[in-house]
Amino acid sequence: MSIITILLLMNLFIETSVSLTVLVPGDPVVGHVGSAVILPCWISPPENAEALEIRWYRHDQFNNTVLLYNHGKIQDVQEESYRNRSSLTLRSDQSGGLNEGDVSLRLEKLTLQDEGSFHCYVSGESAYGKEEVLLKIKGFGSTPVLVPKLLDDGRVNISCKSSGWYPEPNIKWTSVDGRVLRPGGSSHSRGTDKMFSVHSWMAISHSDAHLVSCSISLRTGELQESRIDVQAIISSGPWKALFLTFLICALLGLVGLFLYKYRDRLTGKNPADPNLRFVFILVVEDMTIEELRQHAVEITIDRERLHPDLKVSQDCKTVRDSADYNHTGQGFPYQLCAFGAQRFSSGRHYWEVDLAQENTPPKNYWLIGVMKDGNLTARDRSGLTPSNGSCFLCSDGPNGFHTNTDQSVKLSLTPRPERLGVLLNYDDGQLSFYNVKERKHLLTISSRFSGSIVPLFNPGAGDLSPLKIMDGPNPVEQAESSQPLLSNNSADT
Ligand SMILES: *[C@@H]1O[C@H](CO)[C@@H](O)[C@H](O)[C@H]1NC(C)=O
Ligand SMILES: *[C@@H]1O[C@H](CO)[C@@H](O)[C@H](O)[C@H]1NC(C)=O
Ligand SMILES: *[C@@H]1O[C@H](CO)[C@@H](O)[C@H](O)[C@H]1NC(C)=O
């Protein structure tokens, strides 16, 4: 009799001590490096958890705490690597929160080290329950950077690089008509952060393909793609003097659509994932604005070679269309060109141009680039072709942004640059544009420069703000200025 009673009692005890049921999703939760993720965990049937102990921990070690909630508040005892990164959250919009038993964990700024299992442990006075949530981490890498090099046999060697991937991504080259192209070589490498970088190259001739795309993707479908115009690189006739190519590194709308379509599949229940925005950011290069500015040069407008409908400031730094200029023609006023007084025939040179005055929106119309010295007249767009030795990025208001190649290639640059950085790399034949405020590389035009090159500016017509060249390291002295000179040596600051 007594034995049975004891057994019954034991049974009862065991029953109550495991009667708290904790539920978690059956499938692994997916998070992206750098973003946040929710690890759902809840008590069933719902029960107020405010008075319970909630502990999230890792590696099967109770004391390896990600988050501890006890005595009605979160305790400051977590592992250093989770400090300021973990919090309790709602598993969905419909969740009643802690007082309905939702003890889900939000983890921010994910790193690869966060991959693996997390234990959700909930304990009351006489019962506890625990479950394990598996977190899978993915890295959605950078937009591929395509760099073309013209080979002696007339083909172009295109290199495609991208970094920040996890797990190991696939590389695929295609021509725009859909044919898969075989790369000449591909390699993967892992950085100290354990993320994958990829580099692939292929040598291609004009007859092989016209527009070539390099796309890098994860097995689950997320992909980044860049395209390059091979025809624009390999051209003959008047083009011989200057080989122009593009790095059109815009994430294509196609990619955005793809991600949109599969967003649920890709991210589970996390529609706010930052990787799913429609991005039109171009390449993010390694060079910082500070590094660029080490190549800064002082640029002024050459008054002698100015279009008569342009007005230039006393210090030759600001140019705009004159007030009585009436732009009647169709499209962008290509003829309104101004040129830098400085000439370059080697090395790297960097300058910045302001496209927005304080409290005004950025300019809608501008054209900025370089031009071969000696060709300094432009009556219309035909005067600004690669064969005339010009190379530029143009903002044509609602018509968007374009560069000057044979084929009109349009880019979406959002937000509109307020200040544009221009890096002329004469020796490597590259002209790069940067959004200074956003600290982003926008695009690079590959070219072959010969002879001397001058900066090219066109302020467009009808904008509120003028186009203003920022001071280089050694601003020009205002020799003929009629204004009183201001002292800048004030000792009282
Ligand atoms: C947790 O406790 C175990 C055993 O007491 C110990 O070996 C381990 O280092 C502790 N871990 C942490 C993160 O404190
Ligand atoms: C956490 O946040 C506090 C306050 O915002 C800050 O002082 C502390 O340095 C942060 N700790 C870590 C590890 O980031
Ligand atoms: C193309 O360029 C890559 C480097 O980007 C180089 O490794 C490869 O050998 C080049 N191929 C040819 C055919 O020049």
Image (cartoon, grey):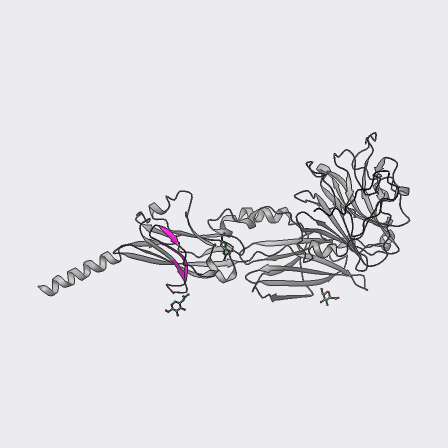
Closest to the observer, 472 or 211:
472
- The image shows residue 178 at horizontal and vertical percentages of 66, 53
- The image shows residue 274 at horizontal and vertical percentages of 55, 49
- From this view, report whether residue 49 is shown above or below residue 186: above
- From this view, report whether residue 188 is shown above or below residue 322: below
- The image shows residue 33 at horizontal and vertical percentages of 53, 56
Q: Is residue 369 magenta?
A: no
Q: Is residue 22 left or right of residue 13?
A: right
Closest to the observer, 104 or 465:
465
Closest to the observer, 48 or 209:
48
Residue drawn at point x = 26 percent, y = 55 percent: 125
Asked which quadrant contains residue 338, the reply is top right
- The image shows residue 40 at horizontal and vertical percentages of 41, 52
Closest to the observer, 285 or 74:
74
Q: Report the residue that reaches farthest toward the front.
A: 492
Point out the image quarter for the N terminus. bottom left
Asked which quadrant contains residue 189, the reply is bottom right
Would you say residue 39 is visible in this rendering?
no
Q: How many marks?
A: 0
- From this view, report whether residue 14 is shown above or below residue 376: below
Stretch of the chain drawn in magenta = 56-74
Would you say residue 140 is visible in this rendering?
yes
Asked which quadrant contains residue 180, the reply is bottom right
